[in-house]
Amino acid sequence: QGDACPPAAAVVGPARRFHAMGQCCAVPGVDGYDFVYSGGLKTVPTGMNNILLLTDSYKVTHHLQYPPGTETVYSYFECRGGIFPEVCFFGLQYFLKRYLVGEVVTKAKIQEADTYFRLHFSNPVWGYDEKLFNRAGWEHILSKHGGRLPVKIRAVPEGTVLPYKNVLFTMENTDPKCFWLTNYLETLLVQVWYPTTVCTQSREQKKII
């Protein structure tokens, strides 16, 4: 929140509704959210290219909640049921190549996440607990693995049709120190449900046509 919002005439589009509330105005931009202040325009990245930020808030602290001695977390993805007896699996390859392949962890991304979570988890009374964000874990991935994610993902081929209640893909960590990483990535990978749902429904519609 800045010192003052700009005059109403200077605020356009989605930001106008925020002006009457006495807040600074957030407008979706190309690279993030553009915040309109009295002194000008500031763009804050949304973090869509930062794997550290592509998770649910509560998962950020899960590394503190696993039983002592945990080394491997193995998770699986399945369709539990629906209006159709079969599911057509599709879309995983896009998410793997877009977000998970290569050196996706960098020093800059770790710092961006640290800064964000300090704001996100801070309390006006109790402050911020340094243990909440697993900075040491991400720095381990950067230093030991060159920023590449130490996970193994196995899946049925894209386009496979199979009855529901079958495993579509599995994921597990390959570094015992990164047991927390497996389910940290769940938030991103469950987005596979969208293309899988579209593909499954399209197949059923084609049967009728």
Image (spheres, grey):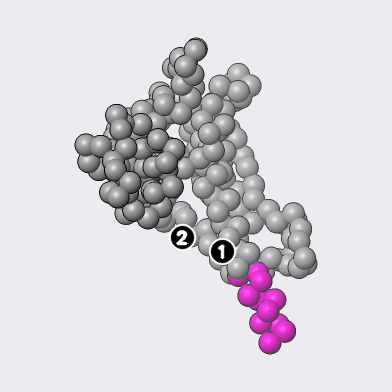
Q: Position of residue 53 (x, y in %)?
A: 44, 39
SS state under label 1:
helix
The quadrant where residue 37 appears:
top left
Q: Please tell me how crowded label 1 is: few (under 14), some (14-19), or many (20+) other residues with Cα within 10 Å.
A: some
Task: Identify which amino acid the numbered label 2 is placed on.
Answer: Tyr
Closest to the observer, 162 or 99: 99
Q: Taken as a whole, is the magenta stretch helix, strand or loop?
A: helix
The quadrant where residue 87 appears:
bottom right
What residue do we see at 68% from left, 53% from top? 78
Which of pointers 1 and 2 lies earlier in the amino acid sequence?
Answer: 2
The quadrant where residue 112 appears:
top left
Give the vertical position of 142 relative to 92 (above or below).
above
CB within 8 Å, label 1 to label 2: yes
What residue do we see at 65% from left, 76% from top? 203
Q: Position of residue 6 (x, y in %)?
A: 28, 41
What residue do we see at 66% from left, 71% from top? 201
Considering the image in quadrants, where does the C terminus appear? bottom right
Residue hosting label 1: 195
Closest to the observer, 144 or 100: 100
SS state under label 2:
helix
In the rendered view, does 164 fall on the left or right side of 49? right
Closest to the observer, 194 or 42: 42
Q: Position of residue 79 (x, y in %)?
A: 70, 56
In the rendered view, does 94 fall on the left or right side of 193? left
Does the segment drawn in magenta span residue 206? yes
Magenta stretch: give its range. Answer: 199-209
Residue hosting label 2: 94
